[in-house]
Amino acid sequence: MVGVCKMWRPMLFSFPFLYAKQLSTVRGFSVQVPVKPSAMSAKTVWKKTGELQHTISSVIIKAGKGLHSGDEAVVRVLPAMAGEGRYFIINRHDVRVPASVKNVTDTTLSVRIGRGESSVATVEHLLSALEGMGIDNCRIEVEGGNEVPLLDGSSKEWVEAIEEAGPCIARDNFGNDMEKMALVLCEPIHVLKDESFIAAFPAPSTRLSYGIDFPQAAAIGCQWFSWCPVDSMAYKQNIAPSRTFCIYEQIQQLRTAGFIKGGSVDNALVCSIEKGWLNPPLRFPEEPCRHKLLDLIGDLSLCAQNGHQGLPIAHIVAYKASHALHVKFADAVLASKSTDPNVAA
């Protein structure tokens, strides 16, 4: 397993300059390294997807404890107009906090976004569900706390609530619909930190590949999972049910540091270094890896602007990445764009 990590590192340092036709393969995992394109002014451009922006038909209401604060909060997700995007209103403050990477204020074990004195933590599971289910525009009100409830530790309950509310075409003030656009990768982009990395390659459609490695916990070990978001059903069945997880021996240390006050065996998978999984069964053999991919979708949804798609059209490969690295990658994607999302390339 350690050999897998070492094989990737020399490749990553040369990714922006590596343009070969052959496949680069690691223990059965493959990524197509593209032929070097001609000189371009930007690595990403906004392009039309051929789909319309969506919102929800009715209000979603969910309540529960926050993972880290342990505080009870109520979340209401309401319809919004085309072009408004996804945004938060926290504890009735008259401040709109767009779900945007530029509003990220903290990435310690979760993602917090805010503006001024208004902020909300652990937004990734809800945003993952909204992005995965194609809900581009909505108003999200959070009351009673400053953290989105963890629910069962996955985005399954959010997905079920979205389906019950009913997705619908979003319209603007004049009753017009709006075509959805997406960032298309034209050249490779990568970010690194120690043994962790995220690299993206031009591709005709979006593919996400994630790897994790927990050599201290044999029940988790080294896992890879690769997935294409072909439609909302693919997200609902393959990603949404995957729950957050932790190492049992690290729980007390995290709680002493002020984290996971709301965590329990009812909303997280717990793995012991010595005994393995303490609250089986798992929903998938590689559920921890799928959950990291769920987090990645939520964090990359922060690339969305004006109700357009957050996930870039590219093959994105992440390994041992954190929320901090997810957000750093999202920053790199947006910094490389050439046009405004309202101007088609």
Image: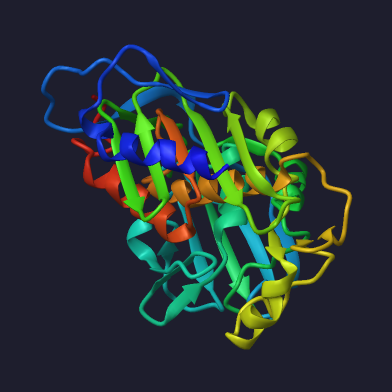
Residue at the front extreme? 3
> What residue is drawn where x is 34% and y is 50%?
192
In the image, is residue 229 above or below residue 117?
above
Q: Toward the viewer: 30 or 184?
A: 30
Evaluate whether residue 93 shows in this view.
yes
Q: Quadrant of the N terminus?
A: top right
* Residue 18 coordinates in the image, percent (x, y): 25, 26
> What residue is drawn where x is 80% and y is 71%?
264
* Residue 65 coordinates in the image, percent (x, y): 73, 74
* Residue 58 coordinates in the image, percent (x, y): 69, 49
Q: Is residue 283 left or right of residue 42?
A: right
In the image, is residue 250 above or below residue 209?
below
Q: Is residue 10 left or right of residue 268?
A: left
Residue at the bottom extreme? 256
Q: Toward the viewer: 68 or 249?
A: 249
* Residue 31 coordinates in the image, percent (x, y): 44, 23
- Number of numbered labels in the structure image: 0
> What residue is drawn where x is 43% and y is 34%?
316
Q: Is residue 294 left or right of residue 249?
A: left
Q: Quadrant of the C terminus?
A: top left
Q: Toward the viewer: 93 or 341?
A: 341
Evaluate whether residue 73 shows in this view.
no
Displayed quadrant of residue 285 = top right
By what rule are the colours in the image chosen? Answer: rainbow
> What residue is drawn where x is 58% and y is 85%?
257
Displayed quadrant of residue 198 = top left
